Amino acid sequence: MSAYIEVGFCNIKGSCRFSTAKICFAQNVTRKNHWTRFTFRAHQSEAVEHEKRFFSLPRPTSEDSVRLFVGLPQDAVSLGRNTINKTRAIVVGLKALKLLGVEGVELPIWWGIVEKDVMGKYDWSRYLAIAEMVQILGLRLHVTLCFHGSKAPNIPLPRWVSQIGESQPNNIFFTDRAGHHYKECLSLAVDHLPVLHGKTPVQVYHSFFESFKLSFSSFLSSTITGITIGLGPNGELRYPSHNQLPSNHKTKGVGEFQCYDQNMLNFLKKHADESGNPLWGLGGPHDAPTYDQSPNSNSFFKDGGSWESAYGDFFLSWYAEQLITHGESLLSLATSTFSDTGVHVYGKIPLEHCWYMTHSHPSELTAGFYNTIKRDGYEPVVKMFASNSCKMLLPGLDKSAACQPHEPLSSPEMLLEQIMETCRIHGVKVSGQNTSESGALGGFEQIKKILCADNVLDLFIYQRMGACFFSPKHFPSFTQFVRSLNPKELHSGDEKEVADSPTKNPESSVGLWPKPCLSSNGPMVLLSKVLNPYKYNSCDAEP
Amino acid sequence: MSTVALEPLLHLCTRKPSFHTQTPILLRPFFLPTRSSNLNDASFIFCQPRRTLSPVPAASLTDTPTLQCPQTTTNTFAFNRTQMVTGKIFVRLDRGKDMKDWELMVGCSLPGKWVLHWGVTFLGDAGREWDQPPHDMIPPGSVPVKDYAVETPFKKSSLYAEGDTLHEVRIDIRAKNGISAIHFVLKDKEAGAWYKNETRDFVVSLVNYLYADSDASKIEPKRGFVFWPGNLWQIYNMFPKSKAGENESSEYRVSERENNQPKGFYEEVYVTKKVLVNNSISVSTKKCFESGSVKDLLYFETDLPGDVVIHWGVCTDASRRWEIPPPPYPPGTVAFKDKALRTQLRGIEPRDGGKVYSAEIAIEEGFTGFVFVLKQNENWFKYLGNDFYVPLSISGSLPSTGNKEDLKEGLQIEEPSQENYLFAFTDTIANEIKNIVKGNFYEKNQKIKSKKAQQSIFEEIERLAAEAYNIFRISIPTFFEPTTAKPEATIVVEPETTIMVPEASVESETISLDPKICSGTGTGYEILCQGFNWESHRCGRWYKELKEIASELASIGFTVVWLPPPTESVSPEGYMPKDLYNLNSRYGNIDELKDLVKSFHEVGIKALGDAVLNHRCAHYQNRNGVWNVFGGCLDWDDRAIVSDDPHFQGRGNKSSGDNFHAAPNIDHSQEFVRKDLKEWLCWLRWLCWRAKYRMPVPTLKEIGYDGWRLDFVRGFWGGYVKDYIEASEPYFSVGEYWDSLSYTYGETDHNQDAHRQRIVDWINATNGTSGAFDVTTKGILHTALEKCEYERLSDEKGKPPGVIGWWPSRAVTFIENHDTGSTQGHWRFPSGKEMQGYAYILTHPGTPSVFYDHIFSHYKAEITSLISLRKRNKIHCRSTVQISKAEKDVYAAIIDEKVAMKIGPGRFEPPSGSQKWSLAIEGKDYKIWEALLP
C-alpha cells in the first residue's frame, strides 16, 4: 500500500501548517504529533510555494479599483452544533463568488463561540476550517472579531461573561436612564477595570487577539488581509443608544444616553467634580427624550435647547470622549498586536443618519458622536483612527434619504460625505459595507454612486451570503453589480503562473494542496462528505 | 405492475464485505429462472476500497531484487450491476384437500421478499371492493392493513415438480364465508415495489366456483371467465400506458391459459424485476524491472462476465486527469480518442472453479495513479460515480522504509477512517478547484477568452448560486397552513346544467388580425409538432437528432415543438421524474437541451417542455420502508404526497384529482410544493436566471423552454395549473387531460358532451391560461372513421362535437401521441385513415398537433401540403366552421369561408354559389378546396 501511504503522508505534511494551533492535534496520539513536527521544517516551504503557484490569489489590486468582499453568514459557525452550518452551501457559494471575481469574504468570529465556556480556552477549529476553505478557493478573508452578542442569529456573549453579568449587571453592562441593561456588549466603562475574574476586558481582548494571531498565523497576510475589531454594540464604536428599536412603521426616535451604569456614573461624577460643577455629575441630561421620541418632545435636543448650554457641552464632550478613549484602547491594542503580520486593522463606526438635518443631530449625540451643526464630532474619532493607522469601516453605503420613509430629517448621504471628507483630510482609508441588519439586499445604484465617486474607499464588504443573497431575485443583480464594478474581466485567477504549473514531477504534485488539519474533529469529516457538489468527469466517453 | 423498481433496489441492497486479497470472491447472482440481461443503469454502492495491510507475497511474476518495494498491493473495488430477472407469478385456484372448499395459491418465482397484499369482496357487497378477509381465511403470519386488506408474506416452497416455485401463499376459501372475489397485488418488500395494475388489481372471482353447486340462482351470474381473464390481458395491455417506469423492464405476458373448466384454473404472468448483482474488480500493482526501466505492473481480475474492456489512463498529479502513457501497450489495446486506452479482458478459468476475466498492464514508472472505468457491452461501470483509481508509488522518492512503516502503522492503527476521509476530502476538493480554476486558466492561456468561455463561467456561477440558494433556503421554514382551497368543490360541475361555452360569446368578437399572445393559445396560429415518440430515448442522443431536423420542421411549417420530459427519470421515457433539477435524461444532457432549444429558436420554433407535475419518484424510504422521501434539490418529505394513496403513505392533503398509482402523487395544495414547482418551472423556462432579469449576456436570453405540455393534469386541480402558468409565463401551454369517453354497450356514445365538459372544466379551472388536448375529437374521429359513421362529427347544435366545438382556442387537436400510438398503441388511430384525421384537424379550428411518427412517414408530403394550406389561408385556433354535411359516409365543412373540406368515401362538392372553389389537395377519402379570390 505504499502509494496510499504516501498520500497519507502528504496529508499530514500539508497539515503541518496548522501545528501552531494548539487544539489541532490535541486528541491525536503523541507519536503522530511527534512525527508531524519532525517533518514540519522539511516540507513546509515547499508546500507553501506550490500553494502560491496554484492558488493564485488575485493580484494586488491597483489603487483605483475597489476590492469587493462578501460577508459569510453570521452563523456560519453556530453556538450549538460542533459543525459548520451548511458547509456545502458555503463552499458552493464561495466557488460562485470566486468565479465571479469577488476578491474575498468576510467572516464574523464571535467571542461568544470561540471563548464560550471558560476564560482563556479558545476553540478556533471551525473558523480555521472555514479559513482553510477560503484559502483553498483562492479567495481572501477579512475577519471580524465580534466582542458583542447578537439576537438573530442567537449568539450571546460568552457564558462565563454572562454569568458575571447576571451577578452584577449594574457593573458591566450599558445601562439607560430607566435602568435597563444592554446585555449584548460590555460597557466601555469597564475597559480597564478587573471585572472579569480579576482581569480587565482589555486584557481579555488582548489574549483573544494573541490566540487568534497564533492560531491563524499561517493565514495572516496571505489569506487574511484585514481584521475588523469589534468596538461595541453591533461591532460599532458607539453607545447602544437605539437598542430599543421602534415598532414597525413608527418613526425612529432619537435614542437614549447610556451613561447610567455604576462605573459610568462614577466617571461622570469624578469628571464633574474636576470641572468644578459637582451637580452636573449626578446623572445624564434630565430633559432628554426617550428612545422613540422625536427631538422636540423634550427640551434637550430642541433648537436652542439644553444641548447648546454649558451643561450640554460639558456632558456631550465627556460622553463622546469616553467613546473615543474606548476606541483608542482597543484599536491601539489591535494595531500593536497585528502590526507585524501585515494585516490591516479596521474599526467600524455607525452611520447615525437619523435627524441629521436638525441642528442638534440627536441620534449621533446619543450614540456618542458630538457632531452638531456647530462642530465636527467625527474629527477626533478620525484622528484617533489615524494615530493608530487603522482603516475605518462605514456601514450603510446603500442608504439614501429617499429610501428612509420612517426616518425623518435623515440624510445618510450627507453624513457619509462628512465622515469621508474628514477621513480624507486625515489620511484615513475608508471601507464600506451595506446595511446588513436591514436584511434587504440591493441598493446597488446607491453603492455604485459612492464607490465610483470616491477613491478614498479601499474595500467594500457586501453583506451577506445566505438564501436571500443567492435567490433568483437577488443574485443576478449582484452579478451585474460586480461586473459593472470590474467590467474588464471575468476573473478567476492568474494566468501566467498556470502556464508552467502542470508538472510532471509527481512528488510536487502530491504536496500541492493544503490539507485540512482537523482530522480529529467533526467538521472535517463533514466537509469531506459535502465538498463534492459536482463531479468532474475526467473520462470523456460518457456512460 | 412493477412500479418503482430501480431506485428502491439500490438503497436496499445490503452491503457485503469486500475484503479480498488475491482472487476476488465470486458473487453469484441469484438463481435466475429464465433470461437475464443487463440494464444500462449500473450503480454502485460500495464506499471505501479496502487496503491490504500486509504485503501479499508476490505470485508468479518475477521480481527484481534491486527494487526497494517488491510488494504487491491489491486494491479490490466492489461495484454493483443491475440485471433483469424474469420470473412468473402464478395464480391457481384448486379444490382443497377435502374437495369441498377451495384453495387459492399465488406463487412467484422471482427472488425477493414478497408479500401478498390482499382483500376480499363479500357477496352482495356492491360498494366496496376491498375488505378485510374473515379470520379463518387469513394464513398465519399475516399482518392486517387497516380494515381493508391483509399482508401475507410468501413462503418458500418447492412443491412443484420443476422445482422453480420459490415463494407462494395459499389461502383457504370456504363457501360459508360468502366471498365473491379476492383482490390482490404483490409487493416486493425488498425493493418497495408493487406489482399491480395501474388502476386495477389482480382479481379472482369465486362466484362460479364456490357457489356453482349451491343455490346458484340467488347469485347474480357473472359472465365470461371466472378468473376474469380480461384482467390479465388488461394488465398486459394497460401496463405500458401506465408509464409505470419499468416499461422496458416489465413485460407481462399471459403465457398459458390452461383451462377454464369449473374444476379450477391456473394462470401465469411473466414478470420482470431488476436485481443488483455484486461484482468486484481487484487490481494488484507491483514494480517490475523490464527492458531497462522500472515499470508498474498492474494485474486486473474481475468476475464481471462477458465482453469487458478496461478503459484506462494514467495521471501525473493529484488531479486525476486522464493522460495516455507512452507505448508500448499490452496486446489488444486500442486508443480511444486520444484520451484513453482500451484493453480487453480475457476470460480465464482458475483452479477453484468459476470464471474470471483478467488483464495485465505494464506502464512506465513515474505516474502517480492509474485511472480506469469498466465497459461491459454498452454498460459503463464506475466506482461510486467516479473513476476507479489506483495510486502508484514512486520507488525512489519515498522516505526510508522504516519511517514509512512507522507511518503506515500509525495511520492504520490510529484513525484509518479519518485518514480515508481526509484523503477523500483533499482529493475531491483539489480536483474540483483545479478543474474550475484551471479550466478557466486554460482558456485564458489559449487566448480564447471568447464570449463562449465567459458564458460557461457564467453558467457555472449560476449553477453554483442555484445550489447554494437551495441549501440556504431549506433551513428557512416557510410552511404555511395549507390554504383551505376546496378544489373538489370546483371540480364537480354538473356537466348537463352548466355547460361552459365561453368561446362562442366572447371570443368570436375578439378575433382580430393580430390576436394577442396568451399562454392558452400562443398567437392563435400555432401548429404543434410532437417531437418524439415512445422509443426516442433509445438512441441516447435524441436532442442531437432533433437538432438536425429543426430546420426541416420549420420548413414544413411548425411553429411549436413539444420536447420529451427532460428530467432525470426512473423510466427511460422520462415520465417518472425523480430529481427535477437534474436535466440529464436519456434524451441528452442539459447542454444538449439548451443547444437544441437554441437551434429551434434560430429557426423560429418555440419549444415546449414536457412537465410532469402530478407525480414524482422518491429517493428514499421512510421509517416504514415506504418510498416517500424525496432527495435532490427538492427534498420534500411525505407532506408533499397526497394522503389518499395508501401505497405511499403521504401526509399531505387529499388529492385534488385522480391518482396515478405508480408513483407518489404530489400534493399541490401544499404551499411549499407549489413554491418549489413554480421556481422549477421558472428555472426551466429561462434555464438561467439572467435571461429573466436581463443580465448583460444577450445571446443567452432566448434559451429555455417557451412553454409547457403538462402531463397527467387529471391528477390535480386546474387552479394550481393556473398558478404555475402565471408564475412561469409560458408562451404556450397545453395539458393532458385524458380520461375515458362515454360508452354504452361497448360503443362510443354519439354525445360526448360529458367528456368534453370535463376537459373544458379543467381549462376553465386554469382560467384559460392553458389549452388541453382535444381527446374528445380524437375519440369521435376514431368511431366515425372506423365504423363509417361520419354523422358523429356534428353535435346536436351543428358544431364540431369535440372540445373544438365549445372552446376551440384552447383545444389542441391531435390524432396520435406517444401513448396512443407509437410502440405503445394504447388507443391507436384507425390504421390507414390517419390522413383523414389530419385533413380534419389541420383544416379545423383549435391548435393542431402532428405526431412525429406521422411526419416522418409516407404521409409527410400530404401533411406538409395540409399545413401549408392552413397557413396560406390563415386558419387559426378560432376559425369558424360551417358544417355542410354530416352523413353516414361523408363529413364536409367550410372553414372561415375560405377552405372547404370533406372526409369519408361519400360525395361532396362545395356549393358553387357566390364563391368559386378550386380543389387544392386530394387524398384517400378526403378532398380540400380553397376559395378562389373573386
Image (cartoon, coloured by chain):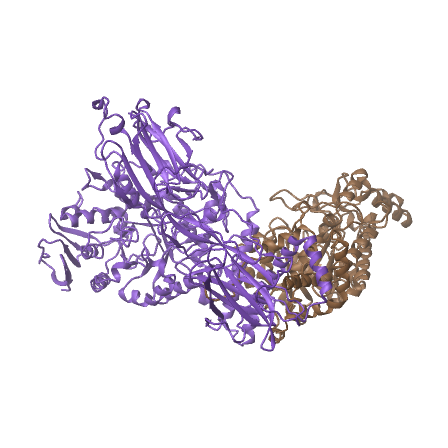
Which shade is chain B? purple
State whether residue B134 is above or below residue A60. above
- Foreground residue among A268 and B597: B597
Outermost residue toward the front?
A: B351
Q: Residue at x 56, y 50 (%)?
A: B17
State whether residue B550 is above or below residue B126. below
In-image side of B71 versus B87 (left or right):
right
Instruction: Name which quarter of the figure residue B464 lies in.
Output: bottom right
Task: Report x, y in % for residue B305.
Answer: 44, 58
Task: Report x, y in % for residue B117.
Answer: 39, 35
The answer to whether residue A359 shows anywhere in this view is: no
State whether residue B400 is above or below residue B188. below
Task: Report x, y in % for residue A122.
Answer: 76, 51
Which quadrant is home to the N terminus of chain B?
A: top left
The answer to whether residue B776 shows anywhere in this view is: yes
In-image side of B389 versus A333 (left or right):
left
In-image side of A274 versus B40 (left or right):
right
Letter of the brown chain: A
Count of residue discs: 0
State whether residue B63 is above or below residue B492. below
- Foreground residue among A40 and A404: A40
